[in-house]
Image (cartoon, coloured by chain):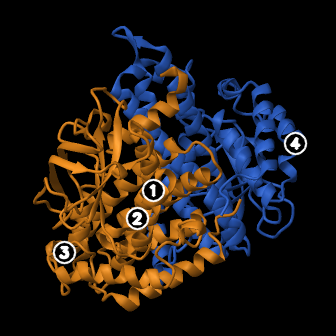
Amino acid sequence: MDFDIGNDARQLRTRLRTSITETFPPEFLGAFTDDPADMAATQAFCKTLADQGLLTIAWPTEHGGAGGDVWAQTVVREEMWAHHEPRGPQYMGLNWVGPAVMAFGTADQKARHLPPIAAGDVIWCQGFSEPDAGSDLAALSTRAVADGDTWRITGQKIWTSYAGIAQWCVLAARVGHGTGHEGITMFLVPMDTPGIRVVPIRTMLGPHHLNEVFFDDVIVGPDAVLGAVGGGWAVIKEALAHERVGIARYARCERLLSLLATGEDGIPDRLRTRWARLLVRVRVARLLAYRAVATQAAGGDFDALASAARIAVTRCDQDVADLLGDALGVGGLDAGADAPLHGAAEDHWRYAQAATIASGTIEVQRMIVARDLLGNAS
Amino acid sequence: MNPLLPEPAVAFGESARRAFGDLGGIDRARRAEHDHDHPDRAIADALGSLGVDDLSVTTDTDAAAAGAVACIEAGRVVLPWPVAGWLTPSCDGSARTRPFALVDPTDPAVDHGATAPRWEISPGNGRVTTATPGTPLATRLGPFVTRVTPTGGFEPATGALAAAAWWSMFTSCRILGALERALEVTVEHTSARHQFGRPLTAFQTVRFALADAKVEVAGLRELSLFTLWRLGTASVPDAHVDALALRMHALDTARGVLRTCRQLHGAAGVCDEYEIAMLGRHLQPTLRLPDDADTVAVELAGSIRVGGFDGLFDHAGHR
């Protein structure tokens, strides 16, 4: 039994932190602010990481990556999220679109899509959720109809992050008139294809995060299909496998709790035990995530472990957000470089509210944990 | 990074479960309530046969893990014996001759006090003394709790802080074992019990409550194993902070999980015939002695202020 993450991972953590702190000012809060310069900075940072060989550290060597093990990948997830995801929207291409293309793509698709992702040149979005297909994703109704050699796609997606700035979309649509998983097919669609209309949704998360995307007789070629026609659910499962352990929200929680303690005013005495309790709960959430990662690496069934970790992690996210707000008073409502924690408390609270919804609601995670716990008894 | 318990400890746990089962499992605790004045030699003999007395927890990581597992297994049957107190390393490095316990110096008391004629007690501040146990409370919540009388003042001892950390970890493992068993029997009960024509587990509110409890208990297990590892690898002050964190979290977790499990048993949850009632009742002394979660949280917050709480994560590396 050994909880030491190892020298390689430790050194990688140091490299990443150094790279981030040399590139971004302390007040950087991610790409999705009202200042377009922040988005531009993240795009440039992806190029820097690519040049340093750090962008695709988790990718297999045969696809130009560094073949980093699960702990290297974990460190990347942690440091990026702890520092407000300085890769901006590109994490999606790196985390799962690239790996899904590796697993299901044709040679042409790999040649076309993997190099730009690895170079930090492209933003992808994920066309999964629909107005009537959220947690129940298999209820999706966007249709793809064969039309000679091409496909004609019609339907609506919603909650699509980065759709307004993405160059490409991984789109889930249904071929035929089946239900459930039947007929679901994945398409790689250029976002500048005629017939695509993006409508931003104004949210507390800031610009670019959530959009509606309308597909009105969008025509794509046969080379747009990723995997088999009707085999889209396998691609979705592969995609979700990379998302299952989820964002390393605990890393930002720990960083913010730490910054609060070392900040100008420290922690008010009345909140000191609540702060200590949260530090411990965040440690627990991290350990649960590590258990899921270790089990995944060993080839074990880790679905329920990942869900347990996500329940713990997302709750911490919201409780830390509340604590920061309570500690900072009006300062916790303030944004900008001059605000306490450079506005990170205000930013974190807004983001944390979606933590128990995004990439699988906490209710779905509970269903998975309960199913695993009850086994045959269920 | 390898969060798995070492194989020898897993095997030791299986042996302990069999041995405690042979003693009657939780019935041993039920029976002991009616005979709480006398040390139960059969338990002492069983622990001796298992080799618990020979575990050198400070020098052998497998032995430390085996000790933790023994406490988990003891917790599953709320074994009426101070296993954690006997496993805690002595303050001077010699073999332990009397069980250890942390106490509130203003009203010192220990669980299972009558099992030994003399105890080593500490307020957790690096000082210890010996003490003699009085008569058990013999109440439903404290059947084996005895107030103890110190034989002298608390004196500084080199290994006292480490002993406090080990004792906190081992007692937290006892809590973990009890909670894991509480969840198991609750899953069994809610699966078997039908209302409105369906098993209770068909109701989403029940499933969600079980899922939440499972996450809490799984988290406590991870923190227990991590703290066990830290006790073998970190400095004493750092490990002491980690042990405080574990104890606080164990107390917080126990309160919520036991309440959920008892509630899901319905009226059966308060009946001694059901394991959940026994687990919840007999665990109370471990959850209250020497102090409550809020008191531990105050101490923890102060300790973190002095020594930090890095553990898995380098806080100092952040600007």
Specify the amino acid type for callout 4: Gly
Instruction: Assign a secondary structure to mark 4.
Output: helix
Mark 2 packing: few (<14 Cα in 10 Å), some, or many (20+)? some
Read off the residue under disc 4: B48
Q: Quick check: can you spot residue B151?
A: no
What quarter of the picture does the C terminus of chain B occupy?
bottom left
Label ID, residue A113: 2
Which secondary structure lies at badge 1? helix
On whether disc 2 and disc 1 are found on a single subunit, the reply is yes
Q: Amino acid at mark 2?
A: His
Q: Which residue is mark 1?
A: A101
Q: Quadrant of residue A48?
A: bottom left
Q: Which residue is mark 3?
A: A33
Q: Of the residues tagged 1 and 4, which is closer to the observer?
A: 1
- Which callout, 3 or 2, points at the residue further toward the start of the chain? 3
Image position, residue B244 (x, y; %): 55, 63
Tell me if label 2 and label 1 are in contact, CB under 8 Å. yes
Colour given to chain B in the rendered image:
blue
Task: Judge depth for marks 4 and 2 and give the one in front.
Answer: 2
Residue at the image position 46 percent from the left and 75 percent from the top: A55
- Same chain letter for marks 3 and 2: yes
Q: Nearer the viewer, residue A343 or A329?
A: A343
Mark 3 belongs to which amino acid? Thr
Label 2 is found on which chain of the structure? Answer: A
